[in-house]
Image: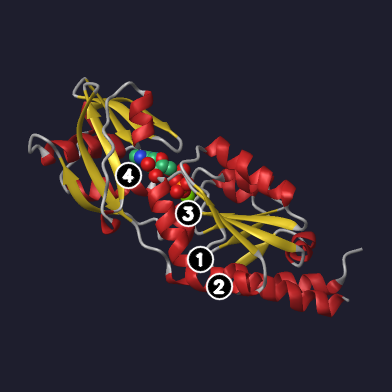
Amino acid sequence: SIPLGFFGGIGASSKKGVLVKGSNFLEGLNNINTVVFDKTGTITEGIFKVNKVISKNKCEDEVLYYAAHVEFYSNHPIAQSVVKAYNKEIDEELVAEFSEISGKGVKAKVNNRPVIVGNRNFLLQEGIEAYCYQSEEDEGSALYVAVDKELLGIILIGDKIKKESYSAIKGLNSRNINTVMLTGDSNKVAKQVSEKLQIGSVYSELLPHQKVEKFEQISNQSTGNTAFIGDGINDAPVIARSDIGIAMGGLGSDAAIEAADIVVMQDNPYKIIEALEVAKRTRSIVW
Ligand code: ADP
Ligand code: MG
C-alpha cells in the first residue's frame, strides 16, 4: 500500500503548481544527484527578440520577409520572434511545402523560391555556403536565411536568462547536486549562459537525438537519480527517458506532458527546489 504521507506531499506540491504523477517520483526526488536542464525556454525565457538583421546587399527587409513567411508555420519560440519583427501581413498563399527539422530549422517554398532558415550547420548540410558570423556578446544567436540555395542574410536573435534560473542553479549547487545544461544552440551562446549561472557542465549544438544520447551517458555515470527539466519543445524524448522527467510551462507538446513524471505549471525553474523541499518534508512524515 502507499503510505498516506505521500498523498499529503502530492497535494502540497500541487498547490505550488507542481503536479507529481505518483508517489514514487516524489520519493525519487530525494535521491537525485544530477539535474540536467534544457536551455531554451527552460533556463532562458525562450522569448526571443530580433536584435539585428545583416545582409550583404542591403536587403534586410527581404531577409525578414522570406524568413517570416516560413517561420509563420513553426511554433518554435525563435519563429515567433521573426514573425513579430517582420510586423507585416503574412501572405499564407505564397508558402508551400513547409517542413521543420527539429533542432535545425525550417524550410519551405515562398513564391516558388526555396527558402531555408536555421542554424549554420543546417545550411551547410543543405549545401549552402554560410560563412561563420562572429556575433558580439549582446547580439545573441545567429539565424541564417537562404533563398534559392544562397545565403541572403543573418538574423541575430537574443533571449534572456530567467531570474529564477540563478536561484535554481544556486540551490542545486548548495545541495551538492550536479547541474548540467544541454542545448541545440551554438557553443558560444551555451558557454555564455552556463558561465553566468555557474552550471557544472554544458553540451551544445546537440540535435534532439543527441540530447537523448548525452542524457543517457550522464544518467549512467550518475550514482543517484538523474532528473531532466525541459520546456517540452524538442525535448520530449529526453523527458521520457529520465528517472525523473520534468516538463515545465505551457508551451511544450502534449507528448512532453504525457512523458513527464512531474509537470510544473509555471515557467519557473525554481520550482525544482520547491519540489525537492516538499519531497524532503514528505519523507520525514512517512519515515
Ligand atoms: P534548445 O536545445 O536550446 O532548446 P532547440 O533544440 O529547440 O534548442 O533548437 C536548436 C537550434 O536549432 C536553435 O538554436 C536554432 O539554431 C535551430 N532552430 C530550431 N528551430 C528553429 C526554427 N523554427 N527556426 C530557425 N532555427 C531553428
Ligand atoms: Mg527548449
* Residue that carries the numbered disc 1 in the rendered image: 198
Q: Does the residue labelled 3 lie within 8 Å of ligand 1?
A: yes
Residue at position x 64%, y 52% from top?
260
Point 47% across, 54% down: residue: 39
Asked where in the image residue 99 lies, by quadrant, the reply is: top left
Disc 2 marks a residue whose amino acid type is: Lys
The amino acid pointed to by label 3 is Lys
The answer to which image quadrant residue 127 occupies is: top left
Question: Mark 4 near ligand 1 (CB under 8 Å)?
Answer: yes
Q: Quadrant of ligand 1?
A: top left
- Residue bearing mark 4: 79
Counting residues from the N terminus, which is met first, the one under dot 4 or under dot 3? Answer: 3
**Numbered circle sitting on residue 39:** 3
Residue where numbered disc 2 is placed:
170
Q: Is residue 2 left or right of residue 112?
A: right
Under mark 1, the amino acid is Gln
Query: Mark 2 touching mark 1, by CB under 8 A?
Result: yes
Q: How crowded is mark 4: few (under 14 residues within 10 Å), some or many (20 or more)?
A: many
Label 4, label 1: how far apart the Cα atoms are: 29 Å
Locate residue 171, reporting x and y percent. 59, 74
Residue in the picture at 7% in, 38% down: 58
